[in-house]
């Protein structure tokens, strides 16, 4: 298992009591595996420290404000690719099928393109395969990460670390401190004009274990989530759980 991927995914889940309790284990897992460099680990550790020290209600409200409202920071990958187009539903079905063929079954309230779920799945795949999928998603990871950096959010550190694992260029220096126009609600944004990233809007999936869910991303706002697994089977257990 590549525990770093699961740990980074856990940090992107709703910061409820379960996640806050798991923060020391998440930090220890990142340090022990050493998959990302010291600078990236330090930035992620600062996020974990902020979540641990901050007022719980404030941290939860901030999470909702960042990730549940607006398109540019959505954690649902297909939101950045398909919007409300008809391709979105089939892409979800295809990705769910990839998980099931690998022996995983999503929890009832989880969507397959939720980034922490994708990262948990990848943590159980060979590292080379995980890196290939992260490369495929790099344009989305960079978009979200740079938007977060512009808003002075420490969550940007997670996306910088994922790009480093993928072997991709890091986040560009953002306009830190510059006021950022608030996103419109996701449904309103897509009602006006879907934005397609990359040369293709279609998701491509292999019929084997590998998958590429970002080359071609869906919505749904997360409710209260902790560091429990996104999957109900095979229900992997690690020190850094969602």
Image (cartoon, rainbow, N blue to C red):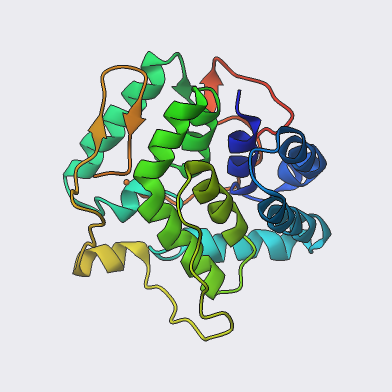
Q: Compared to 162, does 5 lie above or below? A: above
Residue 238 in the figure: left or right of residue 201: right
Which residue corresponds to the image point at 79% horizontal and 63% vertical from the top-left?
Answer: 54
Quadrant containing the C terminus in the rendered view: top right
Tell how many labels.
0
Image coordinates of residue 24 in percent, x first then y, are 82, 42
Splitting the image into 4 quarters, where does residue 195 fall?
Answer: bottom left
Looking at the image, can residue 112 be seen? Answer: no
Closer to us: 108 or 235: 235
Closer to us: 157 or 87: 157
Image coordinates of residue 58 in percent, x first then y, are 71, 66
Which residue corresponds to the image point at 20% horizontal and 70% vertical from the top-left?
Answer: 192
Quadrant containing the N terminus in the rendered view: top right
Closer to us: 100 or 196: 196
Splitting the image into 4 quarters, where does residue 33 fall?
Answer: top right
Residue 83 in the figure: left or right of residue 147: left
Which residue corresponds to the image point at 45% horizontal and 50% vertical from the top-left?
Answer: 168
Residue 94 in the figure: left or right of residue 65: left
Which residue corresponds to the image point at 26% horizontal and 57% vertical from the top-left?
Answer: 197
Residue 58 in the figure: left or right of residue 121: right
Looking at the image, can residue 168 be seen? Answer: yes
Q: Compared to 100, does 84 lie above or below? A: below
Image coordinates of residue 199 in percent, x first then y, are 19, 52
Q: Compared to 222, does 204 lie above or below? A: above
Q: Compared to 125, does 36 lie above or below? A: below
Image coordinates of residue 210 in percent, x first then y, are 35, 24
């Amino acid at each position: 298992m590549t525990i770093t991927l699961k740990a980074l995914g856990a940090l992107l889940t709703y910061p409820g009591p379960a996640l806050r309790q798991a923060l020391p284990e998440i930090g220890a897992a990142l340090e022990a595996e050493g998959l990302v460099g010291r600078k990236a680990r330090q930035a992620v550790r600062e996020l974990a420290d902020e979540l641990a020290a901050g007022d719980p209600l404030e941290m939860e409200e901030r999470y909702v404000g960042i990730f549940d409202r607006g398109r540019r920071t959505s954690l649902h990958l297909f939101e950045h690719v398909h919007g409300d187009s008809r391709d979105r539903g089939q892409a979800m079905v295809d990705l769910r099928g990839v998980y099931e063929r690998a022996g995983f079954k999503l929890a009832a309230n989880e969507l397959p393109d939720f980034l922490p779920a994708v990262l948990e799945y990848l943590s159980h795949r060979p590292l080379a395969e995980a890196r290939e999928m992260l490369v495929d998603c790099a344009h989305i990871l960079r978009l979200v990460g740079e938007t977060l950096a512009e808003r002075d959010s420490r969550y940007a550190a997670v996306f910088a670390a994922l790009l480093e694992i993928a072997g991709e260029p890091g986040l560009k220096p953002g306009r830190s401190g510059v006021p950022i126009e608030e996103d419109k609600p996701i449904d309103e944004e897509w009602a006006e004009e879907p934005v397609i990233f990359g040369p293709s809007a279609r998701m491509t999936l292999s019929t084997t274990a590998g998958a590429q869910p970002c080359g071609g991303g869906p919505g749904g706002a997360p409710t209260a989530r902790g560091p429990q697994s996104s999957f109900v089977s095979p229900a992997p257990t690690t020190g850094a759980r969602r």
